[in-house]
Amino acid sequence: MGGFFGVVGKEDCVFDLFFGTDYHSHLGTRRAGMAVYGENGFKKSIHKIENSPFRTKFDGEASSMHGNMGIGCISDYEAQPILMRSHHGSFAITTVGKINNAKEITEEILKGNTHFFEMSNGEINATELVAAIINQKENFIDGIKYAQEIIEGSMSMLILTPKGIYLARDKFGRTPIVVGKKEGARCAAFEDFSYFNLGYTTERELGPGEIAIMTADSLKTLVAPGDKMKICTFLWIYYGYPSSTYEGVSVEKMRYNCGKALAKRDNVKPDIVAGVPDSGTAHAIGYANESGVPFSRPFIKYTPTWPRSFMPTIQSKRNLIAKMKLIPVKELIKDKSLLLIDDSIVRGTQMRETTEYLFENGAKEVHIRPACPPLVFGCKYLNFSRTNSEMELITRDVIAELEGGEVSDDVLREYADYNSPKYDMMVEKIRERLKFTSLRFHRLDDMIESVGIDPEKLCTYCWSGKE
């Protein structure tokens, strides 16, 4: 995943840029960067943040960089923002998204004698590729539109130029761009909460496919938004920070709604309800409030020296650290029937280890209630994991076992349908494998209702397999 922040002011903007970017740290783990423009031109800095938080790495830049315009990002993948010099002039660009047809686009552009730098894993920097696509056209507007047209996947971007910052939300609005304003300044962000403590109030969200230019004095639409939106529902379930709002819907409130809906359909009577910290907590509170079962914290997440939830990228180490961060409160576990809510089950490894952990500490029962439906299809639109391999999903492994091998998308959709016998077989097999007392997933219709906006505006591909 990743997040970005941009600001344009009549005075020096680096203080706002530093803290606004830092507030996106929950969205990425590997690299971060800032680029500014002022009377001395462009200046850029990029650091690895795998073993140190953004604020520590960029503390020096907060004092040494100066400019009245800037963009910053937190990224799981490529180093960015990048600085470019082309027939458009000099500019800096940062992106959030995924390019599924990068190889084909790169080969086409290379025919024009354009050169690329490879990243350490042999891949092309996606942000550099976007910049190269934009440079194929005579002006920024046509270049951005061209990028949105030919990229398969999604791509939102901020482009810093001497004239202002171009904002472009991806074609179907799968990720957000929201604009804030205060006296003498404007900002653009992935997460709206990132600018509240800096004195900004929300001006508006960009629509799907909208392109605008932002200056301290104005926000001007250059390409009108499209009619079709497919914003990622997983933003509310997991990736979004609790104090964020997308399309007018609070992340925290949506999670309460999820827990409430889970409770209405449940028939177990646990002693306590708990959330896997931190993203499962709000779901669990919603469940507890609706069911009347007390909310409790049978384990506490130790964060002083383990602040980064996604680090490191090696899965075996991530599982170990996930376990090390959870400190049990044995008095709340021993001889108790626990109902535990997590945002989702992906590979299942961490949830199995968490359940074993609770049993080892004396739990009598452990009932698991994921706050979203089973993840059956790998995301085609956003970089949610390093490989995005569908075969890393426990659902796909279980389905392959039940069916005796790989199956068609039509069969997969049968397993994704909560009204089908295949769905029940899959859920029971997952429960057996992960050794839960019981397992019940959030239903797709209930999850959509928990968001509360037009279902046609939501992307639910990873659960339903439907575009």
Image (tube, rainbow, N blue to C red):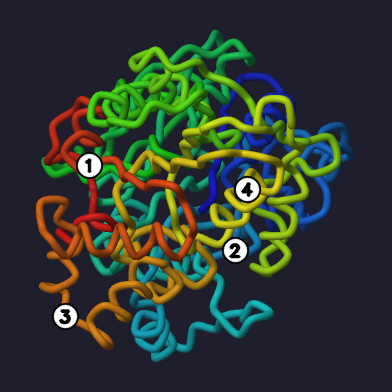
Disc 3 + disc 2, Cβ < 8 Å: no
Residue where numbered disc 4 is placed: 74
Residue where numbered disc 2 is placed: 77
Check the image and report above or below for 397 versus 208.
below
Q: CA distance from mark 3 to mark 4?
A: 37 Å
Which residue type does callout 4 highlight? Answer: Ile
Disc 1 + disc 2, Cβ < 8 Å: no
Residue 360 appears at what percent x and percent y? 69, 48
Residue where numbered disc 3 is placed: 408
Nearest to viewer (mark 3 / mark 2): 3
Q: CA distance from mark 4 to mark 1?
A: 32 Å
Which residue type does callout 3 highlight? Answer: Ser
Q: CA distance from mark 3 to mark 1?
A: 22 Å
Residue 140 appears at what percent x and percent y? 37, 54
Disc 4 + disc 1, Cβ < 8 Å: no
Secondary element under disc 2, as helix, strand or loop, is: loop
Mark 4 vs 1, N-terminal side:
4
- Which quarter of the picture shows residue 299? top right
Task: Name the residue located 63 percent from the left edge and 38 percent from the top edge.
Answer: 70
Which residue type does callout 1 highlight? Answer: Arg
